[in-house]
Image (cartoon, rainbow, N blue to C red):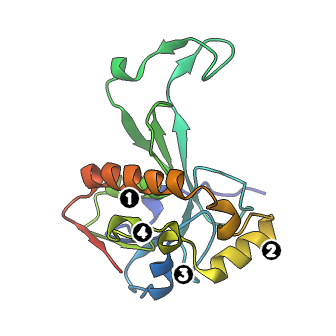
Amino acid sequence: MSTARIKASDFDTTHIDIIGGGPSMVNYIARDEAFVICCHYPTVDNCNAIASNHFGDYGYYTLPYITRKYIDIFSEGGAPGGQRLVKAYAMKKHITVDDWCVYTSYLLKGYNTGVTAYTWAQAQKPKSIHLWGFDSLWSDAESIEAYGHPQVIQDYAHDNFNFRKDEEHFKDQKRNIMNVRNSKRYWKKLLQPNTIIHK
């Protein structure tokens, strides 16, 4: 049996929707012409690809996967114990997209699955990208609960993958709010004019 390899170029990525895991993802309105990327697993019916920095942690689906790989080369022992043989600043590009993969330095912090999806999407040179469920980009809430996953997502992840629900996962309020702030600073540098963030 011969199965053809699925290539990113097989799809029309003129318009891209990315569905994150924040509360506003439940407000998603599908665009007929959009290529839809879901973070971690299919959260909407019209999902065309899955982006995840944690490949396999959320099960496997018959959709293309957009993933992140590290491009630093370490000596025996790997990161963080091994000696870095090729440093990020010695590379020609700090971020490279090839087919379904986003290659970055191991040291690039604040690089979550949403960033992987967005970086890949921008590399396709779309006319528009719409973000849904990326509440940390527009909310100034001081409580981590404001950024939690919708209950339906929590229940699905808990029941299918034995993941902790938000009240357990977000126990360390101060650390998690700092992560949200750091992520927001990172995104400010990344966002391009072709992007709309939905609430």
Tell me the CA gap for discs 4 and 2. 23 Å
Is tag 3's residue or tag 4's residue first in the polypeptide sequence? 3
Q: Residue at x 45, y 36 (%)?
A: 104
Q: Residue 98: x percent and y percent?
A: 44, 43
Q: Is the C-beta separation of discs 3 and 2 under 8 Å?
A: no
Q: Amino acid at mark 2?
A: Asp
Find disc 3 in the rendering and name its residue. Answer: 46
Q: Residue at x 27, y 57 (%)?
A: 191
Q: Residue 182: x percent and y percent?
A: 39, 49
Find disc 4 in the rendering and name its residue. Answer: 134
Q: Is the C-beta separation of discs 3 and 1 under 8 Å?
A: no
Up the image or down, 192 lies above or below 94; here it is below
Pick the residue in front: 173 or 50.
173
Q: Nearer the viewer, mark 1 or mark 4?
A: 4
Q: Residues within 10 Å of mark 1 (few under 14, many from 20)?
A: many
Q: Is the C-beta separation of discs 1 and 4 under 8 Å?
A: no
Pick the residue in front: 99 or 151.
151
Is tag 3's residue or tag 2's residue first in the polypeptide sequence? 3
Label for residue 159? 2
Tell me the CA gap for discs 3 and 2. 22 Å
Q: Amino acid at mark 4?
A: Phe
